[in-house]
Amino acid sequence: MKKRYALTTSICIALLVFSSVAAVQATLVHDHSTRLTITRSEPGTLIRSDAQLSFRFSNAQILLGTPNKLQFDIQLKCDMPLTYLRDNQIFFNYNTQAFGTSIASSGKVTLEKIGILADDPGNPFNPLYNIATFGDNTNSRFFVATETNYPDYAGGQGICIGGVCFQVNREVPLTWVDYLCVSIDVLDGDDLAGIAFEQTLMNGGQYYTAPSSADPVQYFSPNLYDNDLLAQTLGGNIYLDVSVFLEGPFDGSQMTTMLNSGGYLWTFQPYNAYPWYYPGQEAVSVIPSPQVVDWVLVELRQTLGGAATATGETRIARQAGFLLSSGEVVSIDGSNPLGFAVTITEDLYVVIIHRNHLAVMSAVPLSETGGTYAYDFSTDAGQAYGAFLGHKQLVPGVWGMTGADGNRDGQIDNSDKNDVWVYQSGSSGYKAGDFSMDGQVNNVDKIAVWMKCVGRSSQVPA
């Protein structure tokens, strides 16, 4: 495979934040009922921030299709609390031999708000942030601008309705948080992506003032950059040969496919909502095989520190696929293994996520043969991180993922029954309360699954 760069890559990000240095701009008073009193900021005040922002790329992968797409996330974090996201501009150059020129005007790039930018349906002031504009800065440079919808509310201010207060500007956390998901059509898979942060442009002396706000920010500390995508391959893949069982549909030897045969399975992946916010576009026109049980979300993590250090921050890729009745996890074509365009430089761990079962992670690194990494969760208690606590024995000698996590919080408790199962009981379809996964929410789900699992929790490192 030939690999070449078309140009020197640079990205410029100018981020408008409100920091703890500007605490005088918003007075937050909490009483014992958690009601919030706010005062609005005075416009025209220069807010000088000692906060240091860090940026990185994450979850770069090739989405196979016509054409293939390079998909990656942009993440950020801050080293000081009480720093709030405001308006943001990103510019990045790219390898035109890999992607072509003017990718925005030619319709080759798509964007999705994730993480800190994502919509919150429970907030009546949603959406809090918008992708204001994006396009071609030059024929080899792309830009995107995001903005708050509430520029007059500085920092931690909120809006209260009937004694209930809602945050309208989000705090940039001290740990990595998703910001934008970017997908670009691949023109030539023999090339490298050639995308990287440019530190000389994203320096600590810049500031940005939104047209809708008189409040600027000036950095005193330089930004930090964790990685780049200069050498990201666009054609090669590693493959995953993984097997796992779900407790709910397990019948003693394999899993039933009643959601499939009943016509309840969605034709698009269901993990784009809380708590996963996975933005992948995996979808099919029809379910490709009668052996499909359900969708699962597969996550790759790599670390040299052992399984306990394989936290969410070590994640390098995610992809949704199908789980077959035999326990095999396959791509959306219904038969081939999942492929990931990633480079493995450390020990690789795999996490399997299901929408109403407790997630599991491999207890040891996956073994590789000829570019395929294999793992079978079902053969022993020790195959899942946490052993007996990490998953449960379904029949003698067969282990599987614990069912009845209806509210997706990683715990099996009364809220799964009272807030999900009770609410959905008597209904049919693709339901979180259908713990047995037969298409019906009824007493079978409560007695045969929930009652046997209450008190258990996921052991996957957060």
Image (cartoon, rainbow, N blue to C red):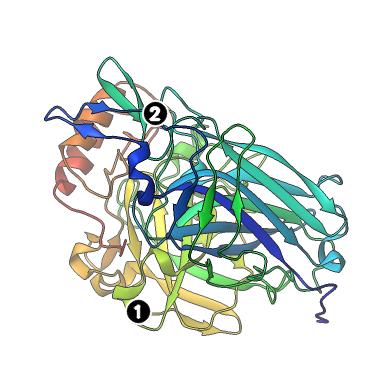
- Please give left or right for residue 276 compared with residue 421 in the image: right
Residue at 28% from the left image edge and 63% from the top image edge? 399
User: Which residue in the structure is indicated by mark 1?
Assistant: 364
The quadrant in which the C terminus is found is: bottom left
Tell me if I can see residue 359 in this picture.
Answer: yes
- Please give left or right for residue 33 compared with residue 299 in the image: left
Which circle's residue, 2 or 1, is located before the other in the chain? 2
Distance, label 2 to label 1, CA atoms, is 52 Å
Where is residue 445 drawn, in percent x and y? Answer: 25, 36
Tell me if I can see residue 271 in this picture.
Answer: no
Residue at 23% from the left image edge and 68% from the top image edge? 386
* Amino acid residing under circle 2: Arg
**Discs 2/1, front:** 2
Question: In the rendering, which numbered label is found on residue 338?
Answer: none
Query: Is 390 situated above or below 213?
Result: below
Where is residue 214 drawn, in percent x and y? Answer: 56, 35
* Amino acid residing under circle 1: Val
- Extreme residue in the front direction: 45
Query: Is 123 situated above or below 452?
Result: above
The image quarter in which residue 96 lies: bottom right
| Secondary structure beneath label 1 | loop
Query: Is 422 situated above or below 70?
Result: above
The image quarter in which residue 231 lies: bottom right
Of residue 265 and residue 224, the one placed in the foreground of this image is 224
| Secondary structure beneath label 2 | loop
Of residue 449 and residue 342, the one placed in the foreground of this image is 342
User: Which residue in the structure is indicated by mark 2?
Assistant: 40
